[in-house]
Image: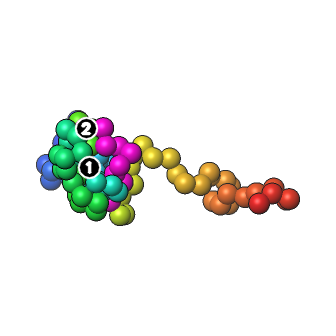
Amino acid sequence: MMASRRDGKSPTTDPAPAAPPYYIAIAPLFIGGQFGRAFNLGDQVPPEHVERYGWQAKVRLPDGYEAADQPPSEPETETGQATSKEGEA
């Protein structure tokens, strides 16, 4: 019978968080019309506000953060770089 680990460390890695701790506003964000400004350009916006008010198109991820479900920016090839065919570009 195998002994269980008692050091508190899991043999598996922790999964990446589903949502970032905050988003960055890329436009002024309003609640309840044009006079209810909630956030200015460049402000940190909580993820729950983005979901509640539908601001997905008006925010961006923080610098250095990549979403777990975001596909890689380049297709994978044997050499690790995307290539083009002769005559394309």
Q: Nearer the viewer, residue 56 or 12?
A: 56
Could you tell me which residue is drawn at 35 percent across and 49 percent down? 58
Residue 59: x %, y % from top left = 34, 51
Q: Residue furthest front?
A: 35
Q: Which mark is residue 53?
A: 2
Give the number of the mark in front: 2 or 1: 1
| Stretch of the chain drawn in magenta | 53-62
Residue for point 32% across, 59% down: 62
Callout 2–callout 1 Cβ contact below 8 Å: yes
What is the C-alpha distance between the residues marked 2 and 1? Answer: 9 Å
Q: Residue at x 37, y 63 (%)?
A: 64
Q: Position of residue 80 (x, y in %)?
A: 63, 59
* Residue name at image x 62 percent, y 52 percent: 76
Which residue, as the protein is rendered here, is positioned at the far right? 87
Q: How is the image coloured?
A: rainbow
Please name whichever residue, 51 or 70, is drawn nearer the observer in this view of the structure. Answer: 51
Q: For mark 1, give the secondary structure.
A: strand
Vertical arrangement, residue 53 with respect to residue 6, above or below:
above
| 26, 9: nearer the viewer | 26
Q: Determine crowd level at label 2: few under 14, some 14-19, many 20+ residues with C-alpha closer than 10 A.
A: few
Q: Amino acid at mark 1?
A: Leu
Task: Name the residue tied to disc 1.
Answer: 29
State whether residue 11 appears in this view. no
